[in-house]
Amino acid sequence: MSAVGTSPARTAPAFALPERPRRPLVLVVGVAVTVIVIAAFWSVDITWSRLGELPAAIVRYTWLMFSAPDWSKLPEALWQTWRSVEMAWVGTVLGVIVATPLSLLASRGFGPAWLRSALRLVFSVIRAVPEIIFAIIILSMTGLTPLTGALALAVNGVGTLGKWGYEAVEAVPQGPIEAARAAGGNTVQVLRWGVWPQATPAFLSFWLYRFEINVRSSAVLGLIGVGGIGDMLTTYTQYREWSTVGMLLIVVIAVTMTIDAISGAVRRRIMEGARVR
């Protein structure tokens, strides 16, 4: 007789592991990307054996530029840097004037669907084209002047400021907007009293950040001859006057870092307010 309360031994059920999901499309895409990358490396006309000489060349030219910078051209460098900053400022102001109303019309709820889609497409196309391409197109009409650089920065700024603007408008809380509409406000009044007071800090921050970008881009635009510090860099680099090039780079770095620091501090004050001590 078996003992009371005993039960036959139970065997643990066997669980089958799930099959690994098959994703042939992912495999095909991965192989295609790998082939494209390898083909790109092989098709580029690069003397790979010279890569070993690159560190020594960097050290050599760094020494030529910064061991004894030629400060005799400093007044001219400061003047050309000021022209670059002016170019960046004018480009920023023009971009803000054009992009701000367009960004409001491109926002969801404040413009017809066809207009929103068209404006967002224009913003995307503009952002896809570098400033230097716009400058090359514009210089055929305005010539090699700082105005060419300012207009190129303004056009490119419309693309970025327009996108940032409509994203900021669509991110504001809906309470004040609904209140303005309930009070009988039209679209302009809703934008003025329901949207703009909330979006102003973001817009000011975007404008300052775009100015920072334009300061750096203005130096690059000078390489095609529209004036500014980039024009001097091109000239003295072509003549292999490395001591002057080193001085120009020091000026560019110092001015750019100073403007970035000041603009960053102002942007933080706008977005975060005064810090309590």
Image (tube, rainbow, N blue to C red):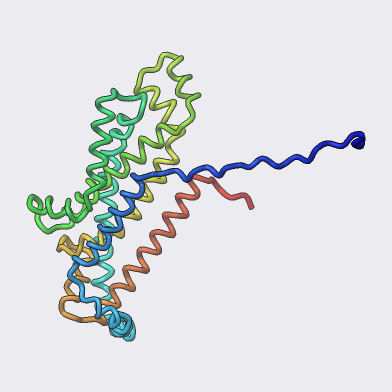
- Determine which quarter of the picture holds residue 259: bottom left
The quadrant in which the N terminus is found is top right
Q: Residue furthest left?
A: 140
Q: Residue at x 26, y 58 (%)?
A: 35
Q: Is residue 198 above or below residue 242?
A: above
Q: Is residue 270 visible?
A: yes
- Of residues 70 and 46, the one nearer the viewer is 46
Residue 145 drawn at (x, y percent): 14, 57
Indicate left or right for 262 with 150 as reference.
Answer: right
Residue 120 drawn at (x, y percent): 28, 35
- Of residues 33 and 202, the one nearer the viewer is 33
Q: Is residue 235 above or below residue 224?
A: below
Q: Residue at x 26, y 63 (%)?
A: 38
Q: Residue furthest front?
A: 1
Count the marks.
0
Q: Is residue 65 visible?
A: no
Residue 67 drawn at (x, y percent): 33, 85
Q: Residue at x 46, y 14 (%)?
A: 182
Q: Is residue 184 above or below residue 48?
A: above
Residue 245 drawn at (x, y percent): 25, 77
Indicate left or right for 152 with 27 as reference.
Answer: left
Q: Residue at x 19, y 49 (%)?
A: 151
